[in-house]
Amino acid sequence: MHEEVQHYYGKELQQSSDLKTSACCTLAPPPKHIQEALKLIHDEVVIKYYGCGLTIPNQLKGLKILDLGSGSGRDCYIAAQLVGEQGQVVGVDMTPEQLEVANKHLEYHRERFGYQKSNVTFVKGNIEQLDKLGFEPESFDLIISNCVINLATDKQKVLNDAYKLLKKGGEMYFSDVYADRRFPKTLQNNPILWGECLSGALYWNDFLNFAKKAGFTDPRVVEDKPIAVNNEEIEALMGEIKVYSVTYRLFKIDGLESDCEDYGQAVAYKGTVEGAPHAFDLDNHHHFPKGKLVSVCGNTYKMLHDTRYRDAFDFYGTWDTHYGIFEGCGGNIPFTTTLDGSSPGVSCC
């Protein structure tokens, strides 16, 4: 399958319009600061870009970033502008044709960005063998990937290696395709469906288990949208299987719990994260307006306090008192809760 993917993205596809479905296409326009960064990127790099989401979070100044499956280098060159000349971006890809495009324009982008030296490096390698590429453990602040992990055959290995390469407090922020059920082997062995980012898509619950097993205890969804395949022949093969483009952020933080636990803590956003002067969104259900005191669970507190976002928030509360599950986060007590023996909301499995 690795050879099939290399052939598909190196030989058969010449530009994003050659894709047979919309699975490997970004579904929403990027924010303004990303659009501005795109203006400085070479046309050939943009034309040969394939992705299903936005994998560039904010607050990147000075970070060291690893891009898994960097392709023609589009996201690397966006990130290179946002980390600044003192930051560093490394792209890993196994397709020679894509790497050739990415490397061909290193000097072009250095000049466009006004840097004394390039802060981007591209490495030939398989993302399932990150442990063989000479990277030091805990050497990256952020790992990104855009619609590539679904193309890997050993996704657990990718997540395991990514966790080891992240510094404490670092994160993996990536977009990919997920399915509402497991694809049958017959479709997984179809090179076109695999290359189109469909039959390699993980069943969402398998992904959550893989991520937690790797050490990413509390995966957070940033954005998710259903994908319209827009190809009758492929839709007929897929039948009832539904696929989604999802952006996840996975933090490497000591002490995260499997559930959202309440310690009576709160945070207030200062409005200082670049590109988010009025409000900051941690994920799709944590919105922090500037200046507003917001109650948070222990995990969310840590995701803000133990990461690069720490200086952007004021923090309130301690870990001294535990109040049970954070309200609204599920995991209610399963036992009888009233003296008359009734237990509202509890049902049999």
Image (cartoon, helix red, strand yellow):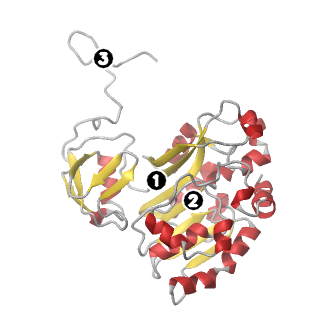
Where residue 208 sits: x, y (%)?
51, 42
User: Would you call the spot at circle 2 few (<14 residues within 10 Å), some (14-19), or many (20 or more)?
Assistant: many
Real-space Cα distance between discs 1 and 3?
34 Å
Q: Is residue 224 left or right of residue 241?
A: left
Mark pair 2, 1: CA separation:
11 Å
Query: Is the Cβ of the residue at disc 2 closer than 8 Å to that at disc 1?
Result: no
The numbered mark, 1 or 3, whose residue comes first in the sequence reads: 1
Where residue 228 appears, as percent x and y from the top left, is 63, 42
N-terminal of the pair, mark 2 or mark 3, is 2
* Quadrant of the image occupied by residue 304: bottom left
Q: Secondary structure at mark 3?
A: loop
Amino acid type for the residue under numbered disc 1: Arg
Q: Which residue is mark 1?
A: 249
Q: Gap in Å between the C-alphas at discs 2 and 3?
A: 43 Å
Q: Is residue 198 above or below residue 91?
A: above
Find disc 2 in the rendering and name its residue.
145
Q: Position of residue 191 (x, y in %)?
A: 79, 48
- Picture quadrant of residue 95: bottom right
Quick check: 330 left or right of 96? Answer: left
SS at mark 1? strand
Q: Which mark is residue 344?
A: 3
Would residue 17 be visible to someone looking at this image? yes
Q: Which tag, 2 or 1, sits closer to the chain's start?
A: 2
